[in-house]
Image: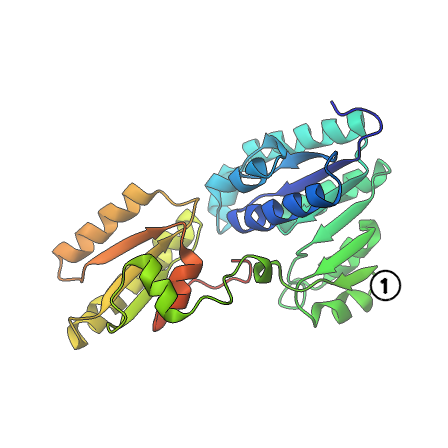
């Protein structure tokens, strides 16, 4: 437990993208206040930034109801662990990072316990289920949006909102040139490079990767000199993905090399990208 005079901030992130943003936020908070006690739910990036991890669901990200139902027991256990700590320690603030189905419930409970709640990277209410904005406004002390037009959406329901800018701008190598990125990846500057980014969730990858591999086969037929690279998220089982690529090659597909931990460099190096939908990196 933290000493009474140390600020305590709990954070809650449930996916790889949230862990990325949470890790950046943890480092920023510690730079502002070196004695801060960070605790909560997150993944390896938040742990590396000095947060005490009470639960880590980020390696088992899901898409769709079927996979989500299978995770209910683990997520319920994580919820209970966080709620116990909230009631026992009364953190100075709870920071929610995306993951709305879980975090909205946690935020309501924390607010009822008298804890200030900050929602960082709130759900895309402008795209679907807009009623969530009003629900968030009822329990959030502050909503920090990452897209400029989101501010107006939350202002319309009287939420205390600020536009912060997208956190990826703090981690993307914006000054990296195409040639520099290719040098880091060991790519010939003259070849055509096509990147595949099928996502970070197992079901998402299972749905999108076959279509991407089929597209890669057709693109390779048009120009055999093209290079294909696949960016693997931290949540991905790389050996399992490598097996899928081997099978695809045995059935006439091109060689596709897996790139781990260098997704942003891959994006800078590629001439064409096939990307799973999403906003959080």
Classify residue 86 by image quadrant: top right
Is residue 137 placed above or below 127 in the rendered structure?
above
Q: Is residue 267 left or right of residue 155?
A: left
Is residue 60 placed above or below 263 in the rendered structure?
above
Closer-to-camera residue (157/190): 190
Q: Position of residue 200 (x, y in %)?
A: 44, 51
Residue pictured at 38% horizontal, 70% vertical: 178
Q: Position of residue 64 (x, y in %)?
A: 49, 51
Is residue 261 placed above or below 7 in the rendered structure?
below
Q: Residues within 10 Å of mark 1 (few under 14, many from 20)?
A: few
Residue pictured at 54% horizontal, 39% vertical: 43
Q: Is residue 26 left or right of residue 33?
A: left
Classify residue 10 by image quadrant: top right
Helix, strand or loop at label 1? It is loop
Closer-to-camera residue (34/47): 34
Classify residue 148 by image quadrant: bottom right
Query: In this figure, which residue is indicated by the disc labeled 1?
Result: 158
Q: How is the image coloured?
A: rainbow
Q: Position of residue 62 (x, y in %)?
A: 48, 47
Closer-to-camera residue (64/33): 33
- Seen as rendered, the residue at the extreme bottom is 222
Does residue 9 appear in this view? yes
Q: Is residue 270 left or right of residue 176?
A: left
Q: Position of residue 210 (x, y in %)?
A: 29, 59
Closer-to-camera residue (38/10): 38
Does residue 273 appear in this view? no
């Amino acid at each position: 437990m933290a000493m009474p005079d140390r600020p305590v901030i709990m954070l809650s992130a449930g996916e790889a993208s949230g862990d990325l943003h949470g890790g950046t936020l943890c480092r920023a908070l510690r730079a502002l206040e070196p004695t801060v006690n960070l605790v909560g739910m997150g993944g390896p990036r938040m742990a590396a930034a000095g947060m005490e991890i009470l639960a880590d669901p980020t390696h088992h990200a899901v898409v769709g109801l079927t996979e989500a139902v299978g995770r209910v027991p683990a997520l319920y256990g994580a919820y209970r662990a966080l709620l116990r700590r909230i009631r026992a320690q009364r953190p100075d603030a709870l920071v929610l990072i995306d993951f709305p189905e879980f975090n909205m419930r946690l935020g309501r409970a924390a607010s009822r316990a008298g804890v200030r709640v900050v929602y960082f990277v709130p759900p895309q209410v402008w795209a679907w289920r807009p009623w969530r904005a009003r629900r968030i406004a009822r329990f959030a002390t502050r909503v920090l949006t990452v897209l400029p037009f989101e501010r107006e959406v939350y202002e319309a329901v009287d939420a205390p909102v600020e536009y912060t800018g997208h956190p990826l701008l703090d981690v993307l190598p914006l000054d990296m040139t195409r040639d520099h990125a290719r040098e880091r990846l060991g790519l010939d500057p003259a070849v055509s490079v096509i990147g595949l980014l099928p996502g970070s969730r197992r079901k998402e990858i299972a749905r999108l990767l076959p279509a991407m591999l089929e597209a890669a086969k057709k693109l390779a037929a048009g120009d055999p000199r093209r290079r294909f690279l696949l960016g693997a998220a931290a949540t991905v089982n790389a050996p399992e993905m490598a097996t899928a690529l081997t099978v695809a090659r045995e059935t006439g597909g091109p060689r596709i090399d897996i790139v781990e931990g260098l997704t942003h460099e891959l994006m800078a190096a590629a001439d064409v990208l096939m990307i799973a939908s999403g906003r959080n990196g």
